[in-house]
Image: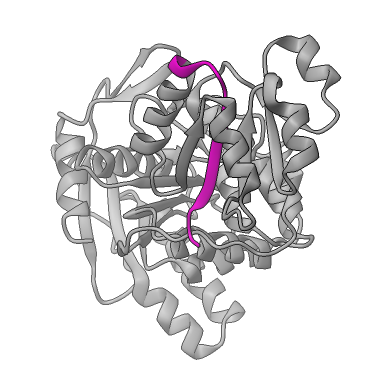
Amino acid sequence: MGKLKIIIVDRDEEYVNCLLDYLMSEQAHKFLVSSFTEEAALDKFLAEEEKSVDLVLTSGEFYEKLLSEFQGLIILLAEGKRTFSQTKGKAINKYQYGDKLVAEILQIFAEEVSVNYPINHDTQKTRIIGIYSPIGGVGKTTIAVGASIQAAWEGKSVFYLNLENTSSLPLYFTGEQEKNLSHLLYFLKGKRKNLSWQIEGAKCVDPFYKIHYFLPPDSIFDFNEDIAEELGILLRELKATKQYDRIFVDFSSAINKNNLAVLQACDDLFLVAQANRTSAVKISCLRKELHLLLAPEAEEALVEKFNLVLNKNLPDVLGEEPEISINEKGIVARIPWVESLTSLQGGVYRLDLNSSFGKAIYQLLSNF
């Protein structure tokens, strides 16, 4: 029961075949799909006593017939604004990009079905890697985005979760989606049923990198609320789907209840700093804060997850490097400073992962 069983009813064979091809090639982990293009075949289906179907997508021609003879969820494939506005039940625009069409289907299903319906995916092992720094301007997000892209280039399925107060996400990724992280957080404060399908209906996919993500919340004040429990549930659900090889979490620099909950939910943590006194002092302060906020066992477990990454390294700079440490691992990686690392293309910044920065990111990820 892990996949939704869908029937497409439409006399337009070309449209049906295109939609079938897309759902079976790009969305096979979500759906089992069959179709009817002739009324006789539909009548035979409706005459069956037991119909193992979760929902029906239908053109306007068969809509009234299905409303009167089928008891399950029916979604009209509407053509044009007039048809859409005149529909009494649930409807989606028939002609739109496949990922958006799927997102709307899943959103309607999650809202209409009362039982909790799980998603099953192939059994991949998902690792959650958090990228955190208590220091501003050290290139934390650049490393988080670079790691996400590098993992995607290696053929891994990737989710990028941005938890910055003011998100940098639109600088690096594109994609269309009506819903954002605020919608999920609001949902998590309520009934929480069909969370997996709510996630599927809200996520966005960058068309260039194929990286999945949520659009930023409506307001930075959403992160000022106590949403530690909601974020923990969201992250566990993302991991439980086993749809992703890597989930990269890009944190804000705050030390608060929300961040602590997500830090503890991560499998590994990259602690980003620079080889200067500011980083040394702030990481020392971080260590003291964790000692005050966490029980000894929880503190030890969290500190052990940290992997210290020094970014923007300039090898020719003279002077003694200050001592920077968070645990006994020492400095795990040094990421070099690269001039003109980003270039503006298509309205977003593209990172040059063929540079020494990219090679260092590749070597860093090879250990995780």
Query: Is residue 51 shown left or right of residue 337?
Result: right
Above or below, 359 against 297 in this view is above
Above or below, 183 against 352 in this view is below
- Which quarter of the figure has residue 124? bottom left
Residue 107 picture location, percent across and down: 66, 42
- Which quarter of the figure has residue 128? bottom left
Q: Which quadrant: the C terminus?
A: bottom left
Above or below, 319 against 322 in this view is above
- Which quarter of the figure has residue 318? top left
Q: Nearer the viewer, residue 352 or 238?
A: 238
Q: How many marks?
A: 0
Q: Is residue 50 covered in magenta? A: no
- Please state the extent of the stretch shown in magenta in the rendering: 1-14
State the residue at coordinates (72%, 35%). 66
Q: Nearer the viewer, residue 352 or 280?
A: 352
Above or below, 191 against 135 in this view is below
Residue 80 picture location, percent across and down: 71, 10
Residue 236 appears in the rendering: yes
Q: Nearer the viewer, residue 103 or 187?
A: 103
Residue 208 picture location, percent across and down: 34, 24
Residue 238 picture location, percent across and down: 49, 58
State the residue at coordinates (22%, 53%). 365
Query: Is residue 218 shown left or right of residue 15?
Result: right
Q: Nearer the viewer, residue 233 or 302?
A: 233
State the residue at coordinates (66%, 35%). 179
Residue 277 appears in the rendering: no
Query: Is residue 179 shown left or right of residue 4?
Result: right
